[in-house]
Image: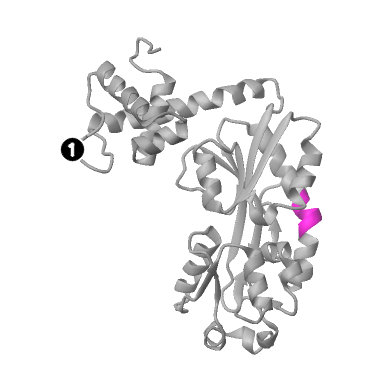
Amino acid sequence: MKSSLGFDLRSLEAFVLACQSGSMAAAAKRLRMTQPAVSQIIKGLEASLSKPLLDRSRRPLSLTSSGTLLRDAAEQILSAAQRIPARLRELDGGMPTRLRIGLVDSLACPFVPDLLSSLQGSIEALSVSAGLANSLRNGFVEHRHDIVLTNDPMEDVDGVVRHALLSEPYLLLLPASLAGEAEASDLRALAHASSLVRWSSQSQIGAEIERHLRRLGIEIPKRFEFDSSDTLTGIVAAGLGWAIMTPLCLLNSIARLGSGRSRPFPGPHFSRRIYLISRAGELDRVSLRIARLSRRILKEKYLPGMLRIAPWLRGQIIVGHPRIAD
């Protein structure tokens, strides 16, 4: 039922989802409605506001100036409405009845069992899903995740709070045939001797590595590309190439390493950073508590193993932020 304003939250949600997804059909799928029902909602908005919102002469979906104004305002309204339940819970200093967390694959275990052990007495339902940074971003933006632990800082997303969890330098992962110091000191020589086993170009870690190679002015032919640390480590262990990885990723797939060896990254070092990201004004105290728990788990359960893999990185793997003491 429409209010005297000419719209309600449901109609605004349908309109915003249609704008974000670029089609009525995609919006209908996410809302679990039919496409005609979504089209009717948007036509009703246009009628109640006496303004055309869509330019139907163009494909794909295109907004009029009125549609652009409504979309921007509606996104703010929906964001504020979605924060209300969490803000009410925050007034009592309590945990939410349900918490949905997304995290990078390399933190799946033992991180999740330890986190659950720490939270189980204060939360009724916890949902945790692991994935690549891109899927975590989508889940967060679409409000399917309340909190994400990710290597994507989401600097282009408004209204987020970032808690630094981990900074870890990249390293080389070499097969036994190339694990000597001479072979590990020159990326161009490595590329000439064997194939670089790349991370997927769709992944955050893959994009970071490619940017660093471009900064170094190094072009390496693309042959192999994967999105799993287990797969990359297994291929290197089989002697089919070499890879660029982080200690945390390697720790997660150490059982696949075989006779492969880790070596320092030659030349200028670069690091992967992992953050806990939440929405400003929503679950603030919960997010801070989980950030502190995450740092403790990383320091106690992960850091020793990472340093066994790459002892030369002692002092360079940073849990939390050097200027922050929670």
Decide if residue 264 is in sight here. Answer: no
Residue drawn where x is 46% and y is 35% of the image: 30
Secondary structure predominantly adopted by residues drawn in magenta:
helix
Quarter occupied by residue 144: top right
171 in the magenta segment: no
Above or below, 73 relative to 110 = above
The residue at which mark 1 appears reads as 57
Q: Secondary structure at mark 1?
A: loop
Decide if residue 111 is in sight here. Answer: yes
Q: What amino acid type is highlighted by mark number 1?
A: Ser
Left or right side of 136 for 53: left
> In this picture, which residue range is highlighted in magenta?
297-302
Give percent across and percent down for residue 322. Answer: 67, 54
In the image, 253 versus 186, the foreground residue is 253
Residue drawn where x is 69% and y is 26% of the image: 97
Give percent across and percent down for residue 131. Answer: 60, 51
